[in-house]
Each structure stands twice: as structure tokens, then as C-alpha cells.
Amino acid sequence: MNDTKKERLSFRQAMAYSRRGFAIWWRTAPEILIAAAVQRAVDALAPYLPLYFTARLVNAIAGGGEPGQVWTMLGWLLASTAAVAAIRAGVNCWDETMRHAHQFPAWNRIFFEKLLSMDFCDVDDPKNQALFTQIQQARQWSGWGLNKLYMRFSDAVGAVFRILGAIALSVSLFTLPVPAGSPLAWLNSPLCLAGMAALLVGSVALSGALSNKASSYWASYDGAAGNRGFSFFYFVAMRDRWRGTDIRTYAQDKFLEDAGKKDMGGETSFGPDSSIGRAGRGPMGLCAAAAQGMSQAFIGVIYLFAALKALGGAFGVGSVTQYVGALAGLAQGFTALLEIVGELRANAEYLKSTYEFLDIPNQMYQGSLTTEKRNDRKYEIEFRDVSFKYPGTDAWALRHVSMKFDVGERLAVVGENGSGKTTFIKLLCRLYDPTEGEILLNGIDIRKYRYDNYLALFSVVFQDFKLLSQPLGANVAAAEGYDRSRAEKCLKKAGFGPRLEELPKGLDTCLYREFEDDGVEVSGGEAQKIALARVLYQDAPFIVLDEPTAALDPEAEAEVYTKFNDIVEDKTAIYISHRLSSCRFCDEIAVFDHGQVVQQGTHDNLVEAQGKYQALWEAQAQYYQKSEE
Ligand code: ADP
């Protein structure tokens, strides 16, 4: 469970990491830093004002001064208490609003901007996915990482203001002398001042160290694993609608509950017998208690010193509370600063993985040529001896693929599972670059074109496409504002017309019910039609359809084929399918086998030739004959 245990970084490195993290927050959401700093400063200074006036009031009463002075002080005390409470409430409200509005969105923005700007091959890399998951889990576990920095920054501001306020209120404890001749005049000796300073430093250092020791048990404890089990069990296994059917039909609940218990807390992760539970009863609890004890002992000594000075006549008895309160605040401020530094050190390990992720470089070459906007849509693509291995693997997913597509052609890509069809499309859309060989657009290596420009040439329906829980029309247009009549036309072309007419809100109907009670659940086949409409709406010169009819019923499938020419118009269409019967309308069929193109030709030619296509055709023929009937 402690497999992610971190090695300790040096203090300098830890502070450098924290500075960088702070700069990231400042760039992303300065408003929450300002609000948090003001809130903590006000919070830290707030107790001092009533403390000051209480001391004056008690001095006035105890000194037997004029009643007017007592009333004045009482008035000041009440007014300052009320003003401080009102200011605190206002500032708290501002800080809370800012925090809720910006803290998590800012964190998400930092990572999602990175994810979106990364080369797709790096997003797809399981190593980077694992790193990102680790960062997310550390945040969920105890706010480790960038989040901790934001939290501790505001605490540090609070501590600094607490120290400043305490100094302002306690200076006179040392400067006001006991009148000469008093038996307590020895309290004026510089040695007393030095002694108090030494005590302060000693108690702060010791209680800070003890409390850092106590929190280090939490810092080194990998609760993320427990949280992972907990979240999976309650939020994924139990609630996920896609898993719900499996859990019920296979009666997986007992099995999951047992598996979850092992990892979920209670029993092993956070329970009394967990390592953190034992530490709490043992060294961690002792350190925390000793730290508290040290602070209280220091306060006792200040009490004694201030009370003796008051007794000697250095100041009124009311000032004793002021000095004790102020010096206790001073010690707390310094202890808090020490704790913050300790926690920032522990946090630096988490920042390290955060930066490892944020610093993943973009390695794909980004060219600057624009793809000419050709009215004749004369775009010609050529794969020239292309081979490809997925990062971190040794097997060739594609090997020596050479192919040319003519404009307006319908190309079918067929082959068994794992033969390289989807990889071929991923290279075509430049989600990955070839390991060997090159892909050319109108005779120029596609790497030399601007990436966004090149991508705009393709609209693709991947096999595992996803629609959003957003209005139907917005899904088709992939935008909020769109051309309604065009969206409708595309839906009709894709065969969604009759269903569209049934929808009372038409294009404004929300898909799925995550956000809207009256959203509609669309079937797999309907979703595929919507995805097809999305392709048509985009009107790119190349359309790529990965198993576009896999979820359609035979009738709908037949409709797509008969209308295919109509749907695709003058575009170049690349079409991946397992079902050979659905490729017959294509001008050219490329047969993939173990990453290679083993045959190319028309359906009629390939069926005649002795080869892979014929073997696949024979194997599927019976099924097709049935479905055609
Ligand atoms: P098809 O689309 O024909 O089913 P793919 O192109 O998906 O085949 O896969 C071709 C080969 O590449 C397979 O051996 C598959 O296991 C491998 N492969 C596919 N995607 C990845 C990936 N992201 N990482 C590593 N290997 C992969």
C-alpha cells in the first residue's frame, strides 16, 4: 500500500518547487490568493484589538480611575469587537465565495489545458495516465500537490500577521520598567529579556519539531490507495450505470464488497489496526501531545513574568492579559510557520510528480505550412512505407504500409481484430507519427503542415466515439451556436430524421439525463447516426468511419449503404469494417493482416483471388446471406 512512498528532497529544492507552484497559482487564479491572504490577515489580527481594549478597561477599573474613562474604554471595547466581527464576516464571505468559485476550477484548468495541449500519443501513454491518476489521488487524499500550496500559503500569511500583531502588543512588556527600588526591579535586567527570548525560541523550535514529527506520519502515509478503493467501491462499482447490469446479473456485490473492504478503510487503510491507527495511539499521538504541552508551558512562564512585572508596578494588572495573549499569539505564529515549512517539504514530493507531468514536452514536429483550401477538394494522401510501434512496445502495429488514396474515392479497410486498422487511421489523423516511413498530403510530409490545419481535413467517427450530455443540435455541430437547418439536414441524411420528428424539443433535446430530467436516452444505433451527422456537419474533405454501422439494425445498416454515395458526396471516405458485405460499395478495399496490407483491390477482384479476403469472405458468407435475406 505504501508503494508510492516518497524520498525526501532537500530544503532548497522543496522551496524552489513551492515557489514554482505559487507562481502557477498566481498566473491561474490570483484572485483567490488575494482573498485568502486578506482573510487570514484579518483573522490573525482580529483578536488583538479586543485584547488591547480589554486590558485598558481592566486597567481603568483596577486603577480606580474616573468612571468616564471606564465607560470610554468599555465603549471602545464593544465598538472594536463589533467592527472586527463585521469585517471578519465580510472578508470570510468574500474568501469563501472566491475559493468555491475558483479553487477547483483553477486546478482543473491547469491540468486540462496541459492534457489538451499534449501530443495525443503522450495522453494515450499509460505511463502518463498513471502519473495523472497519482496526482489526482494525492489531491483527493489530503490536498497534496498544488492544492496544499494554496492552503498553506494562506496559513503562512495568517501566521506572519499574527506575529506582527503580537510584537506590536508585547513590546511594552519589555520596555516598561519596574520602578527602581521595588524588590522586583531585577525583572528590568536585560538577562530577563534574553531569557524570555531564549524560552520563546526553544519552545517554538521544540513544539514545531514535535508537531512536524506528528504530521510526518500523515505525510508519509499513502492514504490514496485506501481512498482509491473507497471511491471505486462506493462511487464506481455501486453507482455506475454501465457496471450496474453486470453487478446484478453476476451477483458481484458480495465479491466487490469483500474486495472493497480489504482496501477501503475501516479494516485496513484507516482503521484502528492500520499503520496510521497504531501511530495515532503511539508516537504520533505522543508527539502531538508533547507539542501542545510545550506551548502551554511557555504560556505559563509568560504569565509568571508579566504578573510579576505588574506586581512590581511596571503596568496595570489588565495589561497582563494583553501580554500573555500577545506572546501566546507570537509563539503560535512561529510554530505555525515551522509547521508550514515542514509540510511544504513533504508536499514538494507531490509537486515533483506534478511538474513531471506538467513538463512533458511536446515532441511531435509542428510544421507551419497551411493546407490550401481547395475548392476542388483535390487532396491526395499517400502512405509511403509506413511502419509503426506504439510507444513502450516492441511489436510492430503497422509494417511497411504503402497506399495512395485518390480524391473522392471510397476506401474500405478490412481485417481481423488487432490487424492494425485503427492504428492506420490514428496515423492518418496524426494522432501519432510513423516510427518509419512518411505520410504525404499532396506530395508533402504531413508533419510540415500546421497541425490544426491538417486535422481540420478529417472528420472521424471512432468506434468508441462519445456523445455529450448536451442538446442534440450542439452535439451535431460540436458547438453551442450553430446553423440549425444544416444540423437538421445532416441528421436526416444520417437516418435520424424520423426520430428527430418525435422529439418534442427537436434539436434542443438534451441527450441523456445527467443534466436534464427530460433528456432522452438514445440507443447505440441512434447514437451512431448522430455521430454520423456530426461528421457530415463538419463537411471536411475526408471522412473516416470506424465500424459506422456496427450498432445499427440490419434495416438501418442497409439504408446507410444504399445512401452512402449520397451521404459522402464528393468527399474521400475511408471506411473500416469487419463486415465484408458492407465494403462492396467501396472503390478500393485494403486488407490488413498483422499490421501489413496484404491485398488491395475491388470486392469482385478480391473475392476471386485466393487470399485473406476470400478466406474472411467465406467465413462470413453464411451470416451475410442470412442477414441479406
Ligand atoms: P484493429 O483496429 O485492426 O482491431 P488496432 O490498430 O487497434 O487493430 O491494433 C493493432 C495492434 O496494435 C494490436 O496488436 C494492438 O494490440 C496494438 N495496439 C493498439 N492500440 C495500442 C496502444 N494504445 N498501445 C499499445 N498497443 C496498441
Image (tube, rainbow, N blue to C red):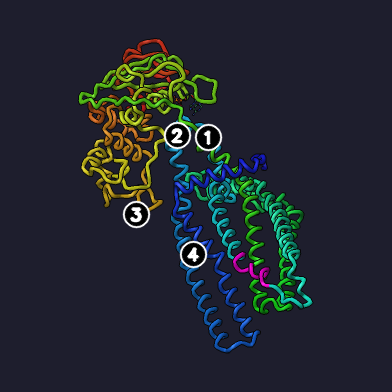
Q: Is 592 placed above or below 552 here?
A: above
Dot 4 falls on a residue whose secondary structure is: helix
Amino acid at dot 1: Asn
Who comes first in sequence, dot 3 or dot 1? Answer: 1
Asked if the residue under mark 1 is in contact with the one under mark 4, i.e. CB atoms within 8 Å, the reply is no
Kindly identify the residue that appears in the image at 21 percent across and 23 percent down. 376
Between 482 and 529, the residue placed more toward the observer is 482
- 367 vs 503, left or right, is right
| Closer to the eye: label 3 or 2 | 2
Which tag is nearer the camera, tag 3 or tag 4?
Answer: 4
Range covered by the magenta-colored residues: 167-176
Residue 266 relative to residue 360: left or right: right
Cβ–Cβ under 8 Å for marks 2 and 1: yes
Mark 3, mark 1: which one is toward the viewer? 1
Q: Secondary structure under badge 1? A: helix
Which residue carries the number 4 mark? Answer: 92
Residue 70 placement (x, y as % from top left) = 57, 85
The kind of residue tagged 3 is: Asp
The type of residue carrying mark 2 is: Met
**Where is mark 2, residue-wise?**
118
Residue sitting at the far front: 180
User: Is 507 displayed left or right of 150 in the figure?
Assistant: left
Q: Who is closer to the viewer here, 398 or 154? A: 154
Q: Earlier in the sequence, mark 2 or mark 4?
A: 4
Secondary structure, mark 2, is: loop
Overall secondary structure of the magenta section: helix
Q: Look at discs 2 and 4 and give the one toward the viewer.
A: 4
- For this orientation, the residue located farthest to the bottom is 67
Nearer the viewer's eye, disc 2 or disc 1? 2
Q: Is residue 251 visible to us here?
A: no
Residue where numbered disc 3 is placed? 518
